């Protein structure tokens, strides 16, 4: 009987302690490269609305040559806000592909947050103008905060960050989350009230909302702007206005997912290039100063798996987490 009878559990506090943003950037970049090379596979996404009003999904995949297999069960439960709890919930399981035995169960909320932030950061580094100084963010929640932090880390040239909340109210949590880093870099954080004006005055636009509809008019986007689109990850969601993708160079994490559940579901005929293909050199792109670029981020299972593997390895080396007996059935 094989001896892998211990299951490693990592809760949210343990995950937080293990996370290093630079390591996550590398792991997410690896996921994009593996996807481009064809050595990392994505299995069909499950994404269903629940009678409770929530959304439940499963993203899974594998990297056969690296013995990496697993899935993330996640979704959005808006009623959790009434419980003073996080509406997004996620759990990741890594599985031994040779035996089917579970290796680790990991709280997926922090992983989802930071791997998405890292993906956004990689998109900015790859496609935004290096001399960008003006950032506009739609949304003030957890994902908007991590997107802002990665943008500030990777673009110390930023001098003003304008943010827009969904109801126009002040967002002290958002300002607290980004304020110290922004101040250290000399970047002013300002709440904006007019979406089109904020977009028109920005070099980088990040949309990180719940995707209830277009956030601004297409005419507001100026030549040279880059957009990271985070919030559209389900059929029917939308953040961008009609006609904008046709004006832009469109990049995606996964083309099939983008056309099914991302912004490209609204413009399926638009040409899109996978970011992994740019990173590996399979696709060429040299930005011109007036190009409008757009990164449609639906989130891939491979991102979750490469980051989860990294954290599992670090946890085992440091003796972090809870080992649970998980005996084989004879």
Image (cartoon, rainbow, N blue to C red):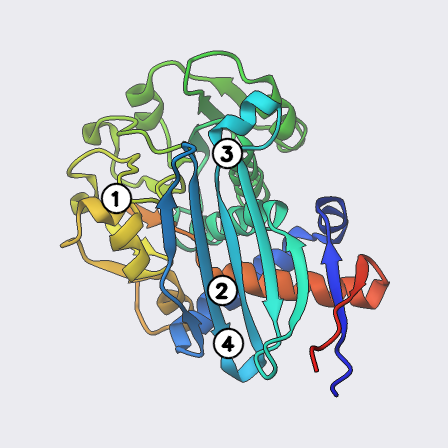
Q: Spatial distance from mark 2 to mark 3, Cα to Cα? A: 22 Å
Which residue does the numbered mark 4 point to in the structure image? 63
- For label 3, the crowd category at 10 Å Cα-Cα, with few meaning under 14, some 14 to 19 and many 20 or more, is many
Which residue does the numbered mark 2 point to in the structure image? 302
Q: Is residue 164 visible?
A: yes
Residue at horizontal 18%, vertical 44%? 247
Q: Spatial distance from mark 3 to mark 4, Cα to Cα? A: 30 Å
Lateral position of residue 153 relative to residue 254, left or right: right
Q: Disc 2, disc 4: CB below 8 Å? A: yes
The tag earlier along the polypeptide, 1 or 3, is 3
**What is the secondary structure assignment of the residue under circle 2?**
helix
Which mark's residue is nearer the viewer, 2 or 1?
A: 2
Lateral position of residue 86 relative to residue 258, left or right: right
Question: Residue 207: horizontal and vertical position, in percent?
Answer: 39, 35
Which mark's residue is nearer the viewer, 4 or 1?
A: 4
**What is the secondary structure assignment of the residue under circle 4?**
strand
Question: Residue 318: horizontal and vertical position, in percent?
Answer: 84, 63
Q: Residue furthest right?
A: 319
- For label 4, the crowd category at 10 Å Cα-Cα, with few meaning under 14, some 14 to 19 and many 20 or more, is many
In what quadrant of the picture does the N terminus appear?
bottom right
Q: Disc 2, disc 3: CB below 8 Å? A: no
Residue at horizontal 41%, vertical 77%? 37
Residue at horizontal 45%, vertical 58%? 59
Question: Residue 71: horizontal and vertical position, in percent?
Answer: 52, 62
Q: Residue furthest bottom?
A: 1
């Amino acid at each position: 009987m094989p001896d892998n009878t211990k299951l490693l559990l990592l809760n949210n506090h343990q995950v937080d302690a293990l996370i290093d943003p630079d390591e996550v950037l590398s792991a997410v970049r690896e996921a994009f490269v593996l996807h481009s090379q064809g050595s990392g596979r994505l299995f069909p996404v499950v994404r269903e609305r629940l009678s409770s009003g929530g959304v439940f999904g499963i993203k899974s995949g594998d990297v056969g040559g690296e013995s990496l297999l697993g899935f993330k069960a996640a979704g959005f439960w808006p009623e959790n806000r009434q419980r003073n709890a996080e509406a997004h919930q996620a759990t990741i399981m890594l599985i031994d592909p040779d035996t089917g035995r579970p290796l680790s169960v990991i709280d997926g909320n922090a992983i989802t947050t930071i791997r998405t932030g890292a993906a956004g950061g990689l998109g900015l580094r790859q496609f935004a103008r290096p001399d960008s100084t003006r950032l506009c963010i739609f949304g003030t929640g957890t994902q908007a905060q991590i997107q802002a932090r990665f943008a500030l880390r990777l673009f110390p040239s930023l001098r003003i960050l304008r943010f827009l909340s969904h109801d126009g109210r002040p967002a002290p949590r958002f300002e607290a989350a980004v304020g110290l880093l922004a101040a250290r870099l000399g970047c002013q954080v300002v709440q904006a009230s007019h979406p089109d004006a904020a977009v028109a005055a920005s070099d980088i636009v990040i949309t990180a909302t719940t995707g209830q509809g277009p956030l601004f008019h297409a005419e507001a986007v100026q030549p040279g702007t880059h957009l990271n689109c985070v919030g559209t990850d389900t059929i029917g969601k939308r953040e961008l206005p009609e006609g904008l993708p046709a004006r832009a160079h469109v990049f995606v994490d996964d083309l099939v997912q983008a056309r099914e559940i991302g912004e490209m579901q609204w413009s399926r005929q638009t040409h899109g290039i996978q970011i992994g293909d740019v990173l590996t050199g399979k696709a060429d792109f040299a930005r011109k100063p007036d190009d409008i670029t757009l990164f449609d981020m639906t989130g891939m299972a491979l991102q979750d798996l490469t980051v989860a593997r990294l954290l599992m390895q670090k946890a085992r080396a440091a003796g972090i987490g809870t080992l649970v007996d998980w005996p084989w059935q004879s």
